[in-house]
Amino acid sequence: MTKSLFSQLIKLLIYLPIVSFFIFLELFGDLVISKAPKVQWHREYNGSGDESHPHYVIKTSDEGFLMVGETGFIDDLTAKIFVVKTDSKGNLLWEKEFGTPGYNLGNCAIQTFDGNYALAGCLNYNAALIKLNAESGKVLWQKTWDLGSEDAFEGLDATPDGGFIVTGYKNGLAENTFLNWGEGLLIKTDEQGRMQWKQDLSSYMSSGYRVRTIPSGYMLSGHPHSEGNQEFNLLKTDFKGKILWSRAFNTVYWGFDMDSKGNMILAGHTRMSPLSQNWDIEVIKLDPLGKVLWTRYFGQPRGYDGKWIHDEVWGARASLDGGWVIVAGTGDETNRYEVRGHPSGPSGEWKIYLIKTNSDGDLEWEGIYGIPDGDWAGEDLCLTKDGGALVANDCGSFGFTKLGPFLNPRSKKILEKTNINGAPY
Ligand SMILES: [Ca+2]
Ligand SMILES: [Ca+2]
């Protein structure tokens, strides 16, 4: 009897620390899951145009999503701004189109401090800022500016006084939704969209692209000064738009985000890559003063000859573990190549290409997502409360492609810190 009790006690002493250890892991286990997440669900919405193309997505405070882009085409002047609001499962809550078919661009969106939404883009060759009711999508107000020929807003953020900071370009070429080689500008408005000041960025940028309110002013990423002079990608201004410093790099970057410490990521695609002679992904991490901490290249995730493969990155997000998620598309458009019979399928079918790095830029996983006989491409991404993400998928319509957790959902307390735009900053 005594012996049995004694052996029970010994067992308890042996097992208790092991059990406690696993309880500890359950509660505070690694935030990171080091393998590519799977698609949980996918929904598509098209507007009145033949096709629709998303550019930007945010997670909203109701855990749903707001995606913005265009329906119709820029090339044949049939485009309208298209906005889709869904719940957390991708079910449609409302959709809206703005502008008459022509040259209209839906480029960026935020949730405002009052819980509604604001969009930045272009209506009929004029830069546009539109505020929408969150419940219905009804326009609360809309402002357009003819700042100079073809102009558009590319990025916006809310400001602490309830107003807006918007960036974009004037005197552009109005050729597409991407590079238009205009003259960069930065505008501050009040809460009703009335302009308070504007800053000419034309000696720095052909276009501002993303802008973020930070405790000491505004940080903005933008496109190079001119096609021949691939320079100036990052500007810091004070709250009046005075330029405090600028940084120049030799690549056109699209993805931009900041982590909670003010570190930044810039992600673009370049032919000057050590991996191949075709477009590969270049990612740089910068400290809060714009000093480059590291540079990494990624590409050819499906294993084709890199000479033919375009890896095109359009977005990047800070991840709550201190790492980064890069969102891209991968494929080729070369009829001469189009590998058929390859284990990964024809290379001409485009796929979403996601890259997860740790804070040092080391690859943790790459994810490839697509469908047979169809084209998918990642345009943007937001993090979700379950530790997963939602990709804005350009699949010929607005694709809402939900990925399962890649951050440990058990670390919920940390994940709840995710702000309304899906980034921790
Ligand atoms: Ca104009
Ligand atoms: Ca490539």
Image: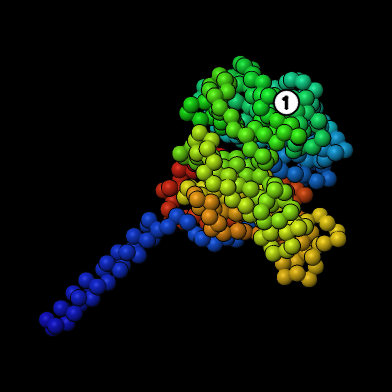
Residue 51 in sight from this viewpoint: yes
User: Which picture quadrant has residue 352?
Assistant: bottom right
Q: Position of residue 338 (x, y in %)?
A: 81, 62
Q: Nearer the viewer, residue 190 or 141?
A: 190
Q: Is residue 207 left or right of residue 415?
A: right
Looking at the image, residue 325 sits to the left or right of residue 152; the answer is: left
| Vertical arrangement, residue 15 with respect to residue 211, above or below | below
Residue 98: tell me if it is visible: no
Viewer-nearest residue: 396 or 173? 173
Which residue is pictured at 58% across the width and 23% down the height? 243
Q: What is the quadrant of residue 199 in the picture?
A: top right
Q: Which residue is mark 1?
A: 183
Q: Residue 79, percent across and down?
A: 81, 37
Number of marks present in the image shown: 1
- The residue that appears at 19% across and 79% down in the rendered structure is 7
Can you give x and y, in whole percent of width and height, for residue 368 in the image? Answer: 66, 59
